[in-house]
Amino acid sequence: MQYFLKDADRKLEHDAEDIIDSFILKAATNEVKAIQTRLEKISENLPAFEIPGDGEASSSIFKVQQRLRRTYSHVEEEDVVSLEVSTKDVMTMLMTEEDRPHAVVSIVGMGGIGKTTLARKVYNHVEKSGAWLVVLDDIWRSEDWDILKSAFPRGRKGSKILFTTRNRNVTLHTDPCNTPTELSLLTDDESWNLLCRKAFPRSKMGSQCCSEEFEMLGKEMVKKCGGLPLVIVVLGGLLATKMSLAQWEMVHKNIHGHLKGLPHQDHQYGAVNRILVSSYNELSYHIKPCFLYLGHYPEDWEISKSELIQLWIAEGFISPSLESKEILMEDVGEQFLEELIDRSLVQV
């Protein structure tokens, strides 16, 4: 009897829920119909005010925005950090013929200082010849080299191995004759110039592109970056979306406020962390999962743009509701990717 009563109560609850849901659905349907009626009236009045309708403007505006976005590239090597002196040093070592089993040229520095950027720049400058150049990025342990070195031919004149590492001991282990190129932190002037190139990407005036108020705030914020190019580039990408002095002040307060509760020795790490977190928090809600999805890939992994966008669509990060009649989901995905590039969160 008790089970029977429990089943009856449960059925009654379900029936009550169904009735409530039907009333809510009916009310929502009426609201939607009312909104549709208002939209139809507005659409009918558009020609009277010489305002183009959806079919005439939405597609063309989207295409113009895409063309404007593609007129310049944010991720050029010279925009990341000035590496001319370091490039010449590495190129000189690469071009020097040495008769050693494994001639290694190494680039040493802390994370985010520009080792990979320098290696890429050097690789693109090396002329094609009978010799070979192998680039190994981010070697952490001497044991990794011991495993890999047997795969490389020995004693080939003019052939070199270029690798980047954060550990100076690794460079001494790989080749005792090797003098590594050590990248140093940027000076205050170099940091400010780099920030200007990222925060004002369309300006050709460099550090002269902003008023004294912007410059004072910008220099205070860039000091918190500790001379690390990666952090400066991300901060510049964040500030590039802020058009007013008040918005810059909000970013500055966000960074400064986070440091108040930290010991003085932790200020630099705290500032760097806050800048990176703020850049993520500023993303719109529908782009955040697209960015987090990149965490599935190993560091410095290369992936096709079209493949990545298709994966975003398959995961449901780009839904049909974000489309207009003229815009495909692939185009929306490309917009998302362009925004991540604009903010210097993704390199292409």
Image (spheres, rainbow, N blue to C red):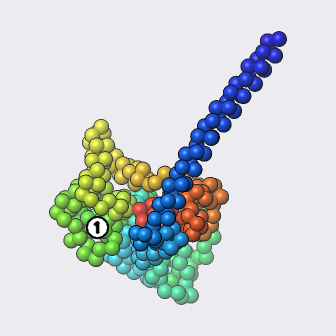
Instruction: Tell whether 3 sits left or right of 171.
Output: right
Identify the element where label 1 is drawn: helix
**Residue beneath the point at 29% across and 54% down:** 247
User: Do we see residue 237 in this rendering?
Assistant: yes
Picture quadrant where residue 86 is located: bottom left
Residue corresponding to mark 1: 196
Which class describes the residues within 10 Å of circle 1: few (<14), some (14-19), or many (20+)?
many
Residue 120 visible in the current orientation: no
Q: Position of residue 262 (x, y in %)?
A: 30, 39
**Compared to 226, does 335 lie above or below?**
below
* Residue at 59% in and 76% down: 154
As drawn, 229 above or below 273? below
- Tell me which residue sits at (53%, 88%) in the image: 129
Q: Quadrant of residue 266?
A: top left
Residue 252 position, x and y percent, is 27, 51
* Nearer to us in this view, 234 or 329: 329
Q: Is residue 227 above or below residue 15?
A: below
Q: Is residue 340 left or right of residue 18?
A: left
The kind of residue on which mark 1 rests is Cys
Figure disc tally:
1
| Residue 272 percent coordinates (x, y) | 35, 51
The residue drawn where x is 25% and y is 75% is 205
**Residue furthest bottom in the image:** 129
Direction from residue 224 to residue 6 in the image, left or right: right
Q: Nearer the viewer, residue 346 or 249?
A: 249
Residue closer to the observer: 2 or 130: 2
Residue 220 location in percent, x, y? 23, 55
Kindly indicate the quadrant of the structure image that contains residue 51.
bottom left
